[in-house]
Each structure stands twice: as C-alpha cells, then as structure tokens.
Amino acid sequence: MKVVIILVLSFLLSIFASAQNSNDSLISVKPDTVHSVKKAMLFSAIVPGAGQVYNHLAMPKGKKKAFWKVPLIYAGLGVTGYFMLNNNGLQKSLKSEYYLRKNSNFTQKFDSKWEQYDEQGVAQLYDQHLNRRDLFILAFGAVYLLQVIDAAVEAQFVSFDISENLSLRISPTMLTNQNAGLRLSFNFK
C-alpha cells in the first residue's frame, strides 16, 4: 500500500514539475487549445485524481478549481478500502472460527475474540461482515467511477464561456392593449 501511495505522489509531482518547467509539455495545456475529455477520463481511470489535475492545469488562471478534489478522492477510496479490507479479515476469521467449532467437538481452543458467541452467533456475525464487505466493495467502485465521471464533466467545462458578455434580461412589456407580459432577451457577444 505504501508503494502505491509513493508511486501516485511521484506521478503527481512529476506532472506539476513538467507543467511548470516546459511550455510545450503534453500536460501543460493552454486555454485556447482543445482540451481532451478522453484524456481526462483516461488519466483518472489509470491514476485516481490525475484527470482532475489535468483539468486544473488546463483551466485559465482565474477559473482553476479542480485541484481540491484530489484529497477527497483519495479519502473516499482510502476509507472504503479500509472498511472493505477490515470486514474481509473479520469474515475470514469468523468463517475459520465457525468451521473450527463445527469440526472440533470442543477439543481445540477457540479464538478469544469470538468465545462469547455460540455457533449461531458466529454464523450471524460472519454473514453481517460478509455483507458489509460486499457493500464496501460497491462503495469503492462507486467512488472510483464517480471520480472518472467528475473528470469527464470537468473537462467539458474547461473551455466553457461564462464571461460577462453572456446575459439574460427580463423586462415587462405590453403584448396587446389590455394584456401585460414579459420580454426575454438573450445577449451572446
């Protein structure tokens, strides 16, 4: 696990270093060039959070906002991964305890963690931790998929124009002599 964290951090640091040192780098995208949604999704699929960093580097200076999501992504993956592994270990321990009790005829010592439970209690705990493990596997997959989708959506908005030249004006007007109405006028400059 430590090796994966070190590899991810070194990858992200190399992206920042290359973006700051060279202007013709693949990662350093100027706002007027075409930003690739597929690249953002691919980066996020390979290394969680890399698509968000790619989008952050491509945004113009005043609009940068995608970088703050990376710690949240790793927190979500870390928490769901921790509980998934924890419940997996507990269900394995409970499974071996149940089979030990079933086959030993009380000649062997049981695990001290589970000695307060009878066979039925151990079986119920096993099912509970098995279900929790499966739910956390789904949660881990959902966090992973959401960060890929977020990178794709954010990449769509990299070149989205939200300047002051776009406006919607609503004003009252008379439609006929007796009927009042509203006039909508859009300005695209």
Image: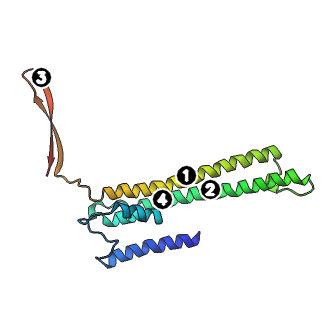
Q: Name the residue under label 2.
A: 84
Q: How crowded is mark 3: few (under 14 residues within 10 Å), some or many (20 or more)?
A: few
Q: Residues within 10 Å of mark 4 (few under 14, many from 20)?
A: some
Dots 1, 2 in contact, CB < 8 A: yes
Q: Mark 4 points at which residue?
A: 73
Find the residue positioned furthest to the left: 177
Callout 4 amino acid: Ile
Residue 17 falls left or right of residue 165: right
Mark 1: secondary structure = helix
Q: Where is residue 2 in the image (x, y as percent from the top left)?
A: 58, 71
Look at 83% across and 51% down and name the residue there: 115
Q: Distance between the residues labelled 1 and 2?
A: 9 Å
Q: Name the residue under label 3.
A: 179
Find the residue positioned furthest to the front: 38
Callout 3 amino acid: Asn
Q: Name the residue under label 1.
A: 139
| Along the viewing direction, whichever of 145 and 180 lies nearer the viewer | 145
Mark 2: secondary structure = helix
Q: Position of residue 116 (x, y in %)?
A: 82, 48
Q: Distance between the residues labelled 3 and 4?
A: 55 Å
Mark 3: secondary structure = loop
Q: Which comes before the other along the chain, label 3 or label 2?
A: 2
